[in-house]
Image (cartoon, coloured by chain):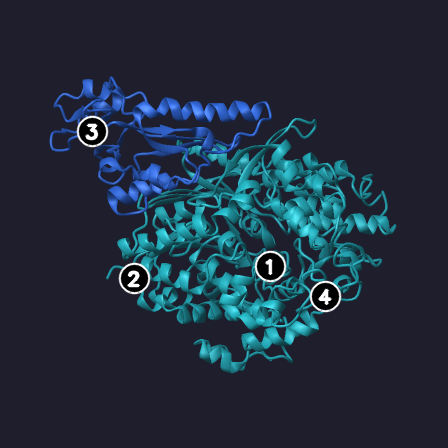
Chain colours: A blue, B cyan
Amino acid sequence: MVEGVQNLLVIDPDKCTGCRICEEACSFHHYGEFNPRRSYIQVLRNDFEGVFIPMTCQHCGKPLCVEACPTGALYQFGNAVFLDKSKCIECKQCLNACPFGGIQVDPVTFQVVKCDLCGGDPQCARRCPTGAIKWVRADQVGYQKKVDGAQRSARLISLIVPQG
Amino acid sequence: MELGGYAGRYLRVDLSSGKVWVKETPKELIRNYLGGLGFAVKILWDEVDEHTDPLGPDNRLVISTGPLTGTMFPAAGRYQVNAKSPLTGIWGHANAGGFFGPELKFAGYDFIVIQGRAERPVYLVIDDDLVELRDASHLWGEERNGRFYGGKTTFETIQMIREELGDETFKVAAIGPAGENTVRFASIINDLGNAAGRTGMGAVMGSKRLKAIAVRGSRGVRVAKPELFMEVVDDAYRKLLVDWGDALKETLTKYGTPNLVEAINAMGRMPVKNHWTGYWEKAHLIGGERIREEFRVKQASCFGCLVQCKYFVRSRKEPYAGIYKGPEYEALVSFGSSLLVEDVEAVFYANHLADLYGMDSISLGMTIAWAMESWEHGLLTKEETGGLDLSWGNAEAMVELVKKTAFREGFGNMIAEGSKRASEIIGRGTERFAMHVKGNEISAQDGRAHQSSGLTHATAARGADHLTSLSCLEERGYEQVAAERYGADKVKDLVDPQSTRYKGWLVWDLEMLYALGNSLIICWYEVGWPPVFYYPDMARAAAAATGIAEFGDPNEVKRIAKRIAIHRRMFNVREGLRRKDDTLPDRFLKEPMPTGPAKGHVCRLHEMLDDYYEAAGIDKETGVPKDETLRELGLGELAGRWR
């Protein structure tokens, strides 16, 4: 078992309906206000065809932001990447290095911010009404996705598998 | 304590001079009128009167949010659009979901008042504190040789403005060609497919030469008592996901409002053939079950909602092929059963076109239904329809008419006037096929099968409408809810669709309740159907969000709701409306339902109307709110002026 954070935020765009409750919950947890533009998770959307993809920090195993950080403000702890604001010099190198937009600049303070997993109880996953965002122990993710995949293929061949 | 929930300021935009003012939201407006619909009632009463031309520069377009808009209270993502209606000439408003409303609040505005008329087409950009009017000539169509060319669709407009502003997260509300051409039931479309549909708010916007409003906001919403408010939110979540969870999972969440097609048809209340009857043996062709099985590709949701009734469909059949926002129950009826159109894919397409061009699907479909019935009786000729064969069920003609109406081309120019005006222009007895109240086409209910829905249609301030006061207690037999709210002794009558007993009182109670819902603003699909939230829930949420202690008293919010509803009625009284106008077409009052479960019934409106007036404190002779009612609500200065 790894030391530190053992869970992953697992995101399934197929289940996302684009309601943005995750954004509301995130901004309220971190800033005490309902303000999706300050949220660390954002739902990308194509409203022409109904495609919704919640995106946040991927908490990479080999994080480019950590490599780019010159002061050690960004660091890994188990399956997660955290930002120590006391060491951050706002150089924005991490912002450039991250390929996913996992690092962002807050629209109010104009400082670098990122997902901190709400101290171990991510509000986006807790509040998601469809199960599109889940907080799952890393070694359980594969099994969970196998269950989802099996149900999906079973539906394709018209077998009904009870939801479990 | 800081006032929470509200942004605390509003925008006034004068398109004639191009000036914009940022002003403080008046405290007494908040205290007396709460938000959303309430704000608009007060503003339109003060700034518009019986001499105002709905399509003239003096009309006001009020776009308003409520104290819950943008918060985490479930389904508080809607906004109100209000103005004197060009369709009816009286009170007009529409309410839309999506994401535009919260964004306006996030930018720091409770509402916008738009007045005047721009010299050239413009669009309004609100980027937090930066507000500007931009040229919209490239988005606006033009008339050449009597034909209308161009005019970007709502979807094109939204995309183009986002590209111009360089940020696809701008939330945009726009009109299409129909709004530009002041089609009398033109809508405003926001976020690709959410419609502020009814009573021609898009035509008001078009008459002001305002093509769109784009908003981006990062100021957020703060509530007065965050911890208490989240308790309220948790309780609301529990009610929706646990108490009503199973019911929702099998209905709205699973099918969206198309679920109503089968259910409403089974009670014989689904309008068929221009409200001729209430039962269609082919309803399954346009029903929720079929749509889900064959066409549904994705579930969707408005801002912050747990019900999530929106959905997308895919049609593979030419010429209708494409991926579209799925139609609501109302559109399935107005383009489907009302016209006897069996091809649900044509209904998807017509509904999509109505969104693209910006038209209310209810008034549009029901006006086409008027034309088809007039055609059936030989009262319209092929010369008049421009060669279109308006036989019942002709899906091609329907789609063609939808297009022509948006551009006011040929016979579309007649449809664009709405059924009341069109039938008066043509005459020859077509008036008796115009299914409207106060000029607004009747939505997809029928008072013969559901008595109280007839009273709702007859009394609703914006003309025949379901969202003003429709009772769903009878629809689904919510006995427990009826007992809790009104007493066990009344349940038997309350849940009986054919009983008229207590229905006047019921409809008035719901008119106040929905006025409250439209002022806070939360969605009808958790206040109306299913009937989850009632005065105490709303009072608690309002008090926690705003910090105004008086809002925590259910009796006080009910009093505010009554003030809003009565003052709104006074708007129509000032326009000259009286008791005689609270009525229905003869079809509902005199022609017994010809087929289906409600066969043989008429709507016994007269048995309910007096009760309704009595419950509301309205004079039974005139239909004008009594002086004592006005005084009790702090509207004393209105007393004695209208008889």
**Which badge, 2 or 4, comes first in the chain's sequence?**
2
Q: Which residue is mark 1?
A: B477
Name which quarter of the figure residue A60 lies in: top left
Residue at point 82% right, 40% down? B389
Task: Please say if B246 is above or below B192.
Answer: below
For the residues labelled 3 and 1, the Cα–Cα distance comes to 53 Å
| Residue mark closest to the camera, 3 vs 1 | 1
Q: Amino acid at mark 4?
A: Cys
Q: Is residue B332 left or right of residue B637?
A: right
Q: Amino acid at mark 2?
A: Gly
For the residues labelled 1 and 2, the Cα–Cα distance comes to 37 Å
Q: Chain of mark 1?
A: B
Marks 4 and 3 on same chain? no
Marks 2 and 4 on same chain? yes
User: Mark 3–mark 1 contact, CB under 8 Å?
Assistant: no
Q: Which residue is mark 2?
A: B547
Q: Position of residue B108 (x, y in %)?
A: 34, 50
**Total number of numbered discs in the rendering:** 4
- Helix, strand or loop at label 3? It is strand
Q: Amino acid at mark 1?
A: Gly
Seen as rendered, the residue at the extreme right is B378
